[in-house]
Amino acid sequence: MNRQSLQGVAITTMTLIVFGLIWEAGVSYFGVKPIVLPPPSAILRELFSELPWYLGHAWFTLIVTLGGFALAVVIGVALAVLIVESKLLEKTIYTVIVGLNSVPKVAIAPLFVIWMGTGAEPKLAIAFLIAVFAIVIDTVLGLKSVPADILDLGRALRGSRSMMLWRIRFPCALPSLFAGMKVAISLALVGAIVGEFVSSQRGLGYVILSAQGTFDTARVFAAVFLLAILGMLLFAAIVRIERWALPWHASQKDYSPSA
Amino acid sequence: MSERAAAGIRIERVVKIFGDVGITALNEVSLDIAPGEFVSILGPSGCGKSTLLRCVAGLDTPSKGQIVVGGVPVSAPPEHLGIVFQRDALLEWRSVIDNLLLPIEFRGGDSRAVRPHAKALLRMVGLEGFEDRYPSQLSGGMRQRVAICRALVDDPMLLLMDEPFGALDALTRDQLNIELQRLWLANRKTVLFVTHSITEAIFLADRVVVFSPRPGSIADVIHVDLPRPRKLAVRTSELFHGYAGRIRTLFEGMGLLKEDE
């Protein structure tokens, strides 16, 4: 880690600590009941008293999220390539996909339980379904945004269709694909939790729902806290991979042109 | 270094009408270009000179007439064509050397075997040591140099340049004119060079083809009889001024240049 990112982490940590202290002081000053809003100290106590149990559920949620996300990337990119390569598919599949995207996926989550039971599969399916649209739409945009003169160059070089796709269009679309992936990873996490809400015996979604049943507010907050950390780590991981995969991308160049 | 013979171009009564709007971009343009000749096409913006170049490149199809490159009528982009656009059209995700090797890859050649030649080209334009940089780390002039090297790397029969220096500052433009002349003298490719700069057109070319606008047609062809290699100072010579004056008179005749009364 370089100095700048260390500084960033330090600032974030300080902000969170100050926020926690204000929360702690506020709850105690105003005498808020723990069942409404527990103080951070109680949440942390709850979390660390049963840490392995929490981590086990977090692990399940993480696996479902990553599985749904991976499926979304593979299938989403494949769909985007088909859509861009075929006028017919653009008019059919793409229209359907854009239409489907306006259906709230949460509303069809119970269907997956009917179809796939109560194991990990329906959660994976929902995570996939929520995440895939961002991938398809951003990748299609990227594949279509190749500058005209670069396409002309490819034609002048008598490039085959697959040359044009894999050497020109696809690399050109990578920044868009990563933009889509940054959105999709957060959506996949939402999808995993929705799946666990609908029916589950595992995962942080299940922890939240069961704790709600017993008015165990500290436990709800502990699970939410873990979810926040999970979401941030997943997002940071995508940013890391992007840096590694796109060293050329203008948004991260660290030295400017000279004469 | 240069193995492949330069190709001649024959342009026969080419007409280009842009379909739905019915705009005539080119009207009965005929021109013969000898193998190894450097021809500038000079004209104001929108006179159809780029359209003519695109037709020669096989990127646009003439509505009437035909174009023959190296004895073969053009219906698709000809083989062994080098092309440079106004914007360099470099692939941002490829290093300088990998950008240069793109034509080799596209044509199924052995890019490792061509590497030394690619590096030699970069050296000729002063880009030695920049092989592994990305385009975003280069200045506009450096990027256009890479684009020119890319067009030459596969030893083309024909080099088409569409206002390649139009987006550069005047100093860089002069420098690149010198470097292009050096590359051309070393290779003697047939070059079709589209520009709207009178000075640049005369400095580089064996012949300057002056276009008149709307519909684009050839107003005059001027043979430039200046010894090579030409130095920038030649632009202040009397002979050079004579050519420039003739062209300016042509443009005045078209109503493109008007003096204050």
Image: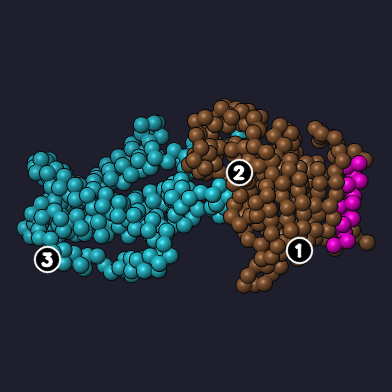
Mark 1 on the same chain as mark 3: no
Q: Chain of mark 2?
A: B
Foreground mark, 3 or 2, reads 2
Image quarter of residue A116: bottom left
Q: Does any portion of residue B139 appear in the rendered image?
A: no
Which quadrant is home to the C terminus of chain B? bottom right
* Chain A display color: cyan
Give the image location of residue B78, x and y in percent. 61, 49
Give the image location of residue B212, x and y in percent. 80, 60
Give the image location of residue B173, x and y in percent. 72, 41
Q: Which residues are magenta?
A: B239-254
Mark 2 on the same chain as mark 1: yes
Q: Amino acid at mark 1?
A: Glu
Which structural element holds mark 3? Answer: helix
Q: Please give the name of the residue rendered at 40% of the width and 67% of the height, measured from the top-left corner.
A: A88
Left or right of B197, for residue A62: left
* Chain B display color: brown
Q: Chain of mark 1?
A: B
Q: Please give the name of the residue rendered at 87% of the width and 57% of the height, measured from the top-left corner.
A: B250
Give the image location of residue A163, x and y in percent. 46, 47
Q: Which mark is residue B28?
A: 1
Q: What distance separates the C-alpha of mark 1 from that of mark 3?
A: 71 Å
Q: Magenta span has B175? A: no
Which structural element holds mark 2? Answer: loop
Q: Which residue is the site of mark 2?
A: B80
Which quadrant is home to the N terminus of chain B? top right
Q: Which residue is the site of mark 3?
A: A114
